[in-house]
Amino acid sequence: LVPILDFGSQYTHLITRRIRSLSVFSLCISGTSPLSTITSLNPKVVILSGGPHSVHADNSPSFADGFVEWAQSNGVFVLGICYGLHLLVQRLGGEVRVGEKQEYGRMEIEVEKSCGILGGKVGDRQVVWMSHGDEAATLPNGFEVVARSQQGAVAAVEDKYRRFFGLQYHPEVTHSPEGMETLRSFLFEVCGVNAGWKMEDVMDEEIKVINNMVGPDDHVICALSGGVDSTVAATLVHKAIGDRLHCVFVDNGLLRYKERERVMETFERDLHLPVTCVDVTEQFLSKLKGVVDPELKRKIIGKEFICNNLGKKPVFFVQGTLYPDVIESCPPPGTGRTHSHTIKSHHNVGGLPKDMKLKLIEPLKLLFKDEVLQLGRILTVPYSFLKRHPFPGPGLAVRVLGDVTEDNALDTLRQVDEIFIQLIKDAGIYDSIWQAFAVFLPVKSVGVQGDQRTHSHVVALRAVTKGLITRSYGSHDWLYLKQFKLEILGRRLLVFYSIDSNMYYFEREFLDDVVQKICNNVRGVNRVALDITSKPPSTIEWE
Ligand code: XMP
């Protein structure tokens, strides 16, 4: 296990993922965790992440007292990245100061001393991604510079004897093309870590944990949403405890076209899950009648959902919470990131009632989305199911703008969405799109169909891909930075902003076909709009 002490960098989770992709298990923990938390993990290597702070600022976060002494006396390797490097330098008696020239973006660095971490020979150059204002000005005793940037700033350091290492740049981002190789050689050649973390082992381990938790007479309930996470979680728990698991699939009337029949078939026929379908359409729709505020819709749906799923007999409740949800719910220290920054309320973490008597089983809570897909494949969840586009918990309620109970909106939307998605599948482009769907707009427009003037609804179509570099499946990845140059008062600044998703561009003929099929087949629709806004400035869903 390689713990990453998180000091708030937007890249911290990426370090975790990179290390896991090298078949070594890694976890983010708070940078200010007590020493006992770190020592209890018994690590051979600890990585200190970057962060948005300066070590000179009041209340800037730091690792626990005694950390470096413990690392040194236990032969633990420590790698500081960016702010993590500054912390190491400062806490070990060196000096960090504001760099004369701040370094943001792609830079070249040059090896000054051949070493384990960077490899290569003196004079070798590589391009790396820098993002820092402070720099290491004086190194602690025992530290040596192993690479410098073009501007002469320290780019990589090591204290081989005490096993402290530092990189001023971010090896974890793809903009540092040799960064992955650096992490690999650091872990395997410098630290001698053994690779061997496999999804099969994760599955066996989780099954053991579940079996130890759930007694022979205990029953477990799982609410299946029809999404990948709850399905994989339930399949795993079912493998562990068999039919002491009871799954409930709630048809809340906000599902897509024939979704209930389709997912029930997968649950029963392919996965043999013990599942009961509960139809609560009337109850949900009556609560949603007249509600137009998106957040209120979400709250009503969350509340109704929970009331419907908690039975009396079971002792445990399975949730498909993923690692990014857990991390997002515990913002790192000193980052100023709090729950109040939530743009839309998603309800997996923190959404359960406080007085819930059931104990939680969250078998995926240390996994990223792509790892859940891997686990799903091992558990033989059908590929077509795993590859389904994400669908929001509140379902079509956030895709019918305004009151979902008006104007036959839900049925109209289902038909439009089905035509759009089927044509996408027929065109063979479904897997290239991250998410595609239709939206029902609460406006009517004038049209002419046949010989008649019509006054019918407008629907919108939306399809997004992940950012160019963010091809991963994680729900909160900030990997793709867009940059632009800005001149203020004669100073050139590089401004970065993160982009989550981009537009998917369809061929003209494809769109013609979609529009024709929708207007010819769906009563009450005479106009189709295409949403061509990326995120930001829009969000993926319209509500
Ligand atoms: P936004 O609209 O925030 O969506 O750009 C990002 C991703 O989250 C999904 N989404 C939700 N998922 N409950 C969910 O479980 C919600 O309330 C919710 N709102 C948005 C959205 O479909 C997209 O994949």
Image: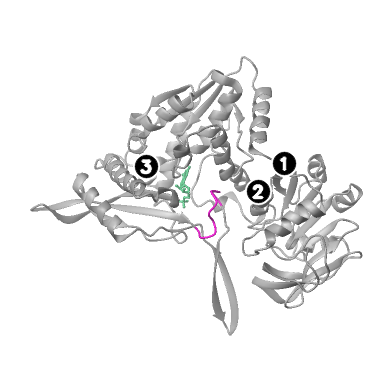
Image quarter hosting the N terminus: top right
Question: At 56% across and 80% down in the image, what residue appears?
Answer: 488
Distance (Cα) linking label 1 and label 3: 42 Å
- Is the stretch drawn in magenta largely helix, strand or loop? loop
- The magenta stretch spans which residues? 467-476
Residue 359: x %, y % from top left: 61, 27
Residue 448: x %, y % from top left: 13, 55
Q: How crowded is mark 2: few (under 14 residues within 10 Å), some or many (20 or more)?
A: some
Kind of residue at badge 1: Gly
Q: Which residue lies furthest to the front in this view?
A: 121
Kind of residue at badge 3: Leu
Q: Residues within 10 Å of mark 3 (few under 14, many from 20)?
A: many
Kind of residue at badge 2: Ser
N-terminal-most mark, 3 or 2: 2
Q: Which mark is residue 396?
A: 3
Q: Residue 21 carries which label?
A: 2
Question: At 72% across and 56% down in the image, what residue appears?
Answer: 183
Question: At 43% across and 37% down in the image, what residue appears?
Answer: 301
N-terminal-most mark, 1 or 3: 1
Q: From the viewer's perspective, is 178 left or right of 535?
A: right
Q: Residue 196 carries which label?
A: 1
Mark 1 vs mark 3, foreground winner is: 1
N-terminal-most mark, 1 or 2: 2
Question: At 64% across and 34% down in the image, what residue appears?
Answer: 200
Above-or-below relation of 81 to 393: below
Above-or-below relation of 293 to 135: above
Query: What secondary structure is found at the residue carrying circle 1?
Result: loop
Q: Does the magenta stretch include residue 18?
A: no
